[in-house]
Amino acid sequence: MNVVPYKIAHGFIITKEMIEDSLIPIQQDQLVRSALRFANKIDKDCIAVIQAGSGSSVAASGKSLAFDGTEFVISGSGGPGIGTYDIINAKAQVEQYNYMPDTMLCHPLAKSHIEKLPHFTSLMHYGEPILQEGLMQTPGKFGDILGLDAFSSTNCPTGSVFVLSRGRTSNILGQYSPMGMFVERRPITTGIKALEERDSVGVYITARYSPVVLKGNTICTIQGVNVS
């Protein structure tokens, strides 16, 4: 096959075919990076909507009941952390509207308080091993506590923990009641744009969507969690 030189750089002949072949892995790398940024943007938007749509709140006390019947407090340097009392009170706020709380969402710094609770670390009271089958396949999930799937995200506010019913199960009356919806007007679309000023090719991702909370009473915020 006859190869037509495209340009000569530093004594090497660069052909058009070589340039086209080299664009493929570069585009793949750009697409992966763009996809990760896009997924993080969706995560931020969803958490912001959950925070704004919360129907009730409780103040963090950091109190828990030890297995010997004594109370203890987990605190940060500037105030209370989060304890089992706080989680139980937040669950009650959701349950009073006949919803079944199934999820807890927190910042990794608040997660460090939760992981220190005996109810999280003790197998006898926890009910099942922390390292569950398939756990690593669920991004952000780090275990269960008091019947709630526990998730952490750096996009969650550091001083707030959310206890919610995301509609994984029906409510106490047997009706399906989702917390909200993720409305997608236009699905995720990828494109390529020539960047002539850089003699390169850019990959971009676009979509039109809107996360919406339909039932604020499915969410309770534990406020004032000190993570320092």
Image: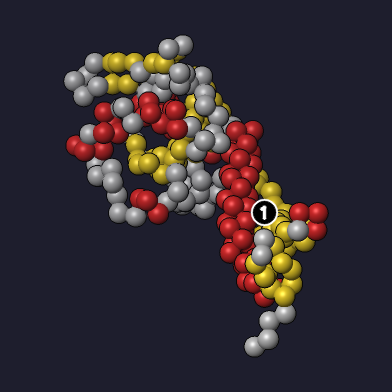
Colour option used: secondary structure
Numbered circles on residues, count: 1
**Residue appearing at x 41%, y 23% in the figure:** 82
Q: Which residue is mark 1?
A: 183
Indicate whether 199 appears above or below 111. Answer: below
Q: Quadrant of residue 13?
A: bottom right
The residue tagged with tag 1: helix, strand or loop?
strand
**Residue appearing at x 35%, y 18% in the figure:** 74
Farthest-out residue, front:
11
- x, y (%) of residue 101? 45, 40
Farthest-out residue, top:
78
Asked whether 147 or 158 is in front, the reply is 158
Residue 95 in sight? no
Residue 38 in sight? yes
- x, y (%) of residue 36? 57, 50
Indicate whether 183 appears above or below 227. Answer: below
Q: Quadrant of residue 218?
A: top right
Given the image, on which type of amino acid does mark 1 rest?
Val
Describe residue 117's horizontal placement relative to residue 37 as left or right: left
Asked whether 54 or 44 is in front, the reply is 44
Asked whether 101 or 222 is in front, the reply is 222
Farthest-out residue, right:
197
Q: Residues within 10 Å of mark 1 (few under 14, many from 20)?
A: few
**Residue appearing at x 63%, y 53% in the figure:** 34
Quadrant containing the C terminus in the rendered view: top left
- x, y (%) of residue 47? 58, 39
Quadrant containing the N terminus in the rendered view: bottom right
**Residue appearing at x 81%, y 54% in the figure:** 197
Indicate whether 5 appears above or below 156. Answer: below
